Image: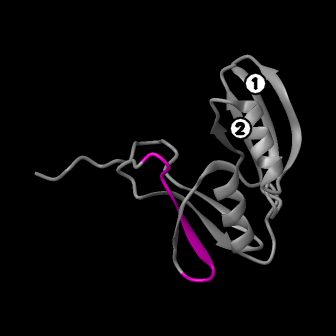
Amino acid sequence: MSEPSPHRHHAIDYVELTVTDLAVAKRFYADAFGWQFNDYGPEYAGIRSPHGDAAPEVGGLRLDSEVRAGGPLVLLYSTDLDRSVQAVKEAGGQVVNGPYEFPGGRRFHFTDPSGNELGAWAEQ
């Protein structure tokens, strides 16, 4: 009998971010959020699940000459939003909106060194 698949129907399974400098992007996400990577050469790095989940990777960083506008907004969860804001700034990112309150808690948006916009939210 085979093991059950870690993938969930209609769930986000993998998020790929285009970056203009792979080394800078890896350093930013490692410093800001503790992410770790599987390297697949000079143009791609897989993002390993930070919690040791059954899925070996949850996304990837893909090198390209420019970031295409209008990509998906990826939201990260934070148990300490103010600390996450500080970590983003210290790692070289830029806060572009917030932190602000919304019906589910608080959140902010930021850009990474390549210009990708992401958000982070917390329940309080």
Q: Secondary structure at mark 1?
A: strand
**For the point 70% across and 50% down, which residue is it?**
32
Magenta stretch?
41-51
Q: Quadrant of residue 112?
A: bottom right
Q: CA distance from mark 2 to mark 1?
A: 9 Å
Q: Is residue 51 above or below residue 37?
A: above
Amino acid type, callout 1? Arg
Residue 21 at x, y = what percent? 75, 74
Q: Secondary structure at mark 2?
A: strand
Horizontal side of 7 relative to 30 (left or right) equals: left
The residue tagged 2 is 120
Horizontal side of 1 relative to 4 (left or right) equals: left
Q: How is the image coloured?
A: one colour
The crowd level at tag 1 (other Cα within 10 Å; few <14, some 14-19, many 20+) is some
Amino acid type, callout 2? Ala
Residue 13 at x, y = what percent? 49, 50
Judged from this view, the residue extending furthest toward the left is: 1
Q: Quadrant of residue 104?
A: top right
Q: Quadrant of residue 114?
A: bottom right
The residue tagged 1 is 106
Horizontal side of 10 relative to 69 (left or right) equals: left
Judged from this view, the residue extending furthest toward the bottom is: 42
Q: Nearer the viewer, residue 37 or 60?
A: 37
The disc, 2 or 1, on the residue closer to the chain's N-terminal end is: 1
